[in-house]
Image: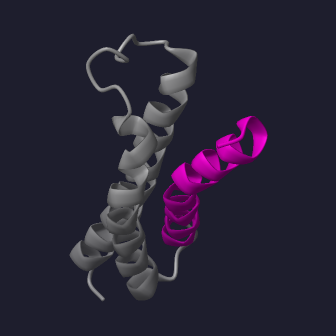
Amino acid sequence: MDKMANIIFKAFSILSLTISGSLLLLFVNTFVDVIPLRQFIQGIPIILPAFVAPFGVLFGFVGYLNMRNKLGLYGILSNIFMFLLPFIYIMGGTLIFGP
């Protein structure tokens, strides 16, 4: 592969990690409230990872499939975790606090 293709596939891997990192920051900000966004985007950071993380998995998979780098693998794993996080949060809240 040429140098430009390597840069593009590495960018896919970095984009995948950026997606999971930004989703995690939004999710944590919901509870810590560092930036007061609660009145504007109420429950969106809780549900958003279920819809956005699959795109991050796709970008990580494209980067990993062509380059076999660890950035792509970490992007895939972190986005899978971010996809499962809202379901874990909702089920955990139901188990702890009851229906």
Q: Up-down: is 64 above or below 18?
A: below
Name the residue nearer the viewer: 77 or 43.
Answer: 43
Rendered residue at 38%/67% (across/down): 54
* Quadrant showing the C terminus: top right
Mostly what secondary structure, the magenta segment?
helix
Is any atom of residue 68 visible in this view?
yes
- Image location (x, y in percent) of residue 44: 34, 37
35 relative to 9 in the view: left or right: right
Could you say which quadrant of the image residue 59 lies in? bottom left
Could you say which quadrant of the image residue 10 lies in? bottom left
Rendered residue at 28%/76% (across/down): 3
Q: Per the image, is 53 magenta?
A: no
* Quadrant showing the N terminus: bottom left
Indicate the colouring scheme. one colour
Q: Residue furthest right?
A: 96
- Magenta highlight range: 71-99
Name the residue nearer the viewer: 35 or 85.
Answer: 85
- Image location (x, y in percent) of residue 25: 48, 33
Could you say which quadrant of the image residue 74 lies in? bottom right
- Image location (x, y in percent) of residue 39: 31, 14
Q: Residue furthest front?
A: 99
- Image location (x, y in percent) of residue 45: 40, 37
